[in-house]
Amino acid sequence: MGIAEEVIKETSRKVQEYSNRGYLCGRIAGSGNVIIIFNPTDEEISQVVDELEKNILTDVKTNDISIHIKKNIGYAIYPEHTDDLERLLYLSHLAMIDATHNEHNEVVKYHPQLSKNLEDNISIASKLRDAINHQKIDIYFQKIININTGEVKFLEALSRWTDEELGYIPPQTFLKIAKSSNLIDDLEEYLITQAIHKFAILKRSLEFRNTILAINLSPSTFLHERFVNFIDQQVKLHQLNPSDICLELSENTFIYQLDICNYFISQYKEKGFLIAIDDFGKEYSSLSVLGSLTYDIIKIDGSFVTRIFSRKNQAIIEMIVKIANMYNHLIVAESVETAEQVEALKKLNCFIQQGYYFHEPQKII
């Protein structure tokens, strides 16, 4: 029996123990289990919820391996939430899905906003599909400047979507919905195609002749064999060189195994693409990551720049710059908004800078 099967079996066994109390227990859809309590008192519900919460985090041993797992648990109540059994299971499922995003290891009780959120997401997903098919999502560019020479070292491609009915929808919102709606591949393919196509036109001008295009890829796109070849084909189609393109590796990619990250980085590097570690220091990354990955550029997260007059943040930036210089890597400082920040970064030998002080994202083309 495989590890996944053993985990499902053990979880189901724990659920079945509740049948001893006269509850209806069973497995439902894949790895899901259900407990139905007939005519429960408020005290009984509270007791079961407390018991389940205490066991949300458990260790399952299989094949001499101990696996630490988290259970996602949600529930709904008859007739408070619905008087239909099938819908009761559905609403419990919505609460369970919400539990997957809960950082506090809690059993989630259904509330009407979950249904409202789902309806909104379905509506946005439908509009997003239409926006992709009819090219309604725009590509903006933000200049990244070498302050010593004044040249535009990079152009970062940014996506912007304004729906006729819903108005402006932030990228983090529609990217999240694209992932949950299985539209992420179509969206990323569209954005990559548009960014490279527009950049190829800009590249003909004197201002951007030596500029590199920076594209931020989601982890699911970056760690996908198909996109390695897809991006390479788009570059060749528009008569660009892979060295004209910098692929930004977002920090949450590091939650995957580093050997997997390095494998895909090597695939892109073999074709000649540049690799940047984006938002460095924001969430998952640490200095140890710099010694574990192959890369060309470090983009220092804007939170350090915003608080650059803190001695601690200056020391961190100074250390990152020294490490980068040691291996001939470039450093880019993000979110630069004032002349004082420009000068402070300059004193720390960070000369490539990005932010509203220099340039607000524009539909240059």
Image (cartoon, rainbow, N blue to C red):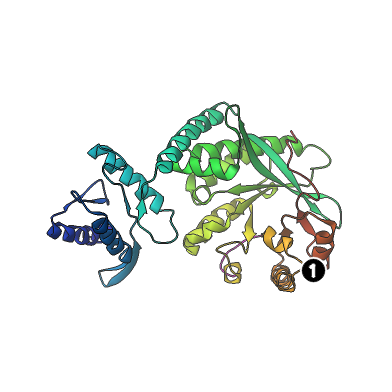
- Position of the C terminus, as image quadrant, is top right
Residue on which the image places disc 1: 348
Indicate yes or no whether the magenta region holds residue 142.
no
Where does residue 48 sit, x and y in percent of width and height?
A: 26, 59
Q: Nearer the viewer, residue 237 or 348?
A: 348
- In the displayed image of the protein, which residue is found farthest to the right? 149
Q: Is residue 217 left or right of residue 107?
A: right
**Which residue is pictured at 68% across the width and 50% down the height?**
243
- Residue 233: image quadrant is top right
Q: Which residues are magenta?
A: 291-298
Where does residue 260 sit, x and y in percent of width and height?
A: 48, 59
Q: Is residue 181 visible?
A: no
Q: Nearer the viewer, residue 118 or 350?
A: 118
Q: Is residue 230 above or below residue 341?
A: above
Q: Is residue 193 left or right of residue 66?
A: right
**Which residue is pictured at 30% across the width and 63% down the height?**
50
Q: Is residue 256 left or right of residue 2?
A: right
At label 1, the amino acid type is Leu
- Residue 360: image quadrant is top right
Q: Nearer the viewer, residue 356 or 326?
A: 356
Q: Is residue 5 left or right of residue 19?
A: right
How packed is label 1: few (under 14 Cα within 10 Å), some, or many (20 or more)? some
Where does residue 332 sit, x and y in percent of width and height?
A: 72, 58
**Which residue is pictured at 59% across the width and 42% down the height?**
171
Tally the numbered discs.
1
**Which residue is pictured at 45% across the width and 59% down the height?**
103
The kind of secondary structure the magenta stretch mainly shows is: loop
Instruction: Say what secondary structure mark 1 lies in.
Output: loop
Q: Is residue 27 above or below residue 203?
A: below
Q: Is residue 97 above or below residue 47?
A: above
- Position of the N terminus, as image quadrant, is bottom left
Where does residue 20 sit, x and y in percent of width and height?
A: 12, 60
